[in-house]
Image (tube, grey):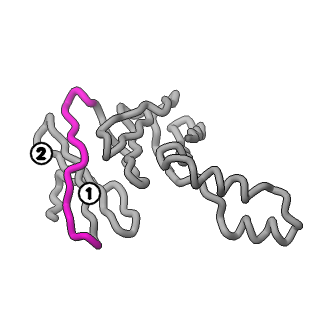
Amino acid sequence: MTFTQNTVPFDFDGDRLLWMNYQSRDLRDVYLYNFPAKTLTTVATFQKRDGIISHMKLLGDCLYYVKNTRDLVRYDMKSHSSTLLGSTRDAIIALYVTRNTIRDFDKEEDEKLGGGLGYEDIDEEAKTTSDEKRYTVACLDEAENLYVFKG
């Protein structure tokens, strides 16, 4: 791995590092380095026609990123397919992506209160739902509007 002034680090999930490198004015490659496996993979290539790419996040086998400052896109690294999740009114300045899971703390608090919130049903649903449909994306735009997209 070599980082230069043309490298934009994006995300690290504890095992994998994600970054983009400007190869030329019109070509950008996105790389994923897996530390446990010691492997480097080119996961995507963007050309000039793809517009501005920013705020890239890694979750499972998908990348979530902002295209042209306002469009939120999910890119599946296995199928090499992109899906537009939505658009914002103003330029996105912050992005957060997480899996839809129930935190252990919430389960424990529910048990203390006598149960009844249906966490078992949510956990069962999570076991049968594919990863690309189990996410929440929150983003903030320049006008301080908060957007939430769920899968």
Residue that mark 1 sits on: 32
**Residue 58 image point, x, y percent:** 39, 53
In what element is the residue under mark 1? strand
Residue 23 numbered mark, or none: 2
Q: Circles 2 and 1: CB distance less than 8 Å?
A: no
Q: Is residue 94 left or right of residue 10?
A: right
**Residue 142 image point, x, y percent:** 50, 38
Residue 48: say if magenta. yes
Taking the spot 50% from the left edge, 47% from the top edge, the residue there is 130
Residue 16: say if magenta. no
Q: Quadrant of residue 91?
A: top left
Please tell me how many numbered marks the rendered image carries.
Answer: 2
Q: Quadrant of residue 115?
A: bottom right
Q: Return the residue found at the far left.
A: 24
- Number of residues whose C-alpha sits closer than 10 Å to that of mark 2, classed few (under 14), some (14–19) or many (20 or more): few
The magenta segment is: 36-50
**Residue 93 image point, x, y percent:** 46, 43
Q: Nearer the viewer, mark 2 or mark 1?
A: 1
* Image quarter (top left, top right, bottom left or bottom right) of the C terminus: top right
Is 28 rendered above or below residue 14? above
Specify which label sits upstream in the sequence, 2 or 1.
Answer: 2
20 or 141: nearer the viewer:
20
Q: Quadrant of residue 18?
A: bottom left
